[in-house]
């Protein structure tokens, strides 16, 4: 697919929200979209509850690991999605940057897997909209 859209999902640690968005996009769009994930200050491991929340939907993150943004990633994307206001990416020529301020249930006293499922479902709805938008560009 010569004009396949590429998207980079970025959060701070690349252990939770960006990994969930990436896994959801791969699941929904398959090979129609090139998907990368990264962190502005990558952590050391994936968030176990994020991984578990995706597994509940039949999505396996496989051998994903936390990583920083690379020039190779930037060369293959036209869109960067930051998840949360803490993840800040410097402008890249020719690449659109959007921010998703995702639901944060902990602000309402919701923790644990109940929190993670709400975060996942918020990200899933956004990814579904984005996948539909990207499909019209291809």
Image (cartoon, grey):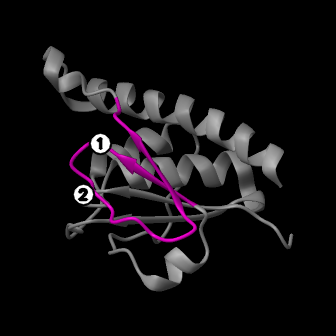
| Above or below for 116 versus 21 | above
**What is the x, y in percent for residue 6?**
64, 64
Name the side, left or right, on which 75 lies relative to 14.
Answer: right
Which portion, as a residue range, is magenta?
A: 79-102
Q: Work out whether residue 115 or residue 104 is closer to the camera in this orientation and state it.
A: 104
| Residue at position x 56%, y 46% in the image | 24
Determine which of the numbered discs, if any, sits on residue 84 in the image.
Answer: 1
Quadrant holding the C terminus: bottom right
Q: Work out whether residue 22 or residue 50 is closer to the camera in this orientation and state it.
A: 22
Q: Work out whether residue 9 or residue 25 is closer to the camera in this orientation and state it.
A: 9
| Residue at position x 54%, y 33% in the image | 126
How many numbered marks does the figure carry? 2
Name the side, left or right, on which 70 lies relative to 27.
Answer: left
Q: Residues within 10 Å of mark 2 (few under 14, many from 20)?
A: many
Give the quadrant of residue 79: bottom right
Quadrant holding the N terminus: bottom right
């Amino acid at each position: 697919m010569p004009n396949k859209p590429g998207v980079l999902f970025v959060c701070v640690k690349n252990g939770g929200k960006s990994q969930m968005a990436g896994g959801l996009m791969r699941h929904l769009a398959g090979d129609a979209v090139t998907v990368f994930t990264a962190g502005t200050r990558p952590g050391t491991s994936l968030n176990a509850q994020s991984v578990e929340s995706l597994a509940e939907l039949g999505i396996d993150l496989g051998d994903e690991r936390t990583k920083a943004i690379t020039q190779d990633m930037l060369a293959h994307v036209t869109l960067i999605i930051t998840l949360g206001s803490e993840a800040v990416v410097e402008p890249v020529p020719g690449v659109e940057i959007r921010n998703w301020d995702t639901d944060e249930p902990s602000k309402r006293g919701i923790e644990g897997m109940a929190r993670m499922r709400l975060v996942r479902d918020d990200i899933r709805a956004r990814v579904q909209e984005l996948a539909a938008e990207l499909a019209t560009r291809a």
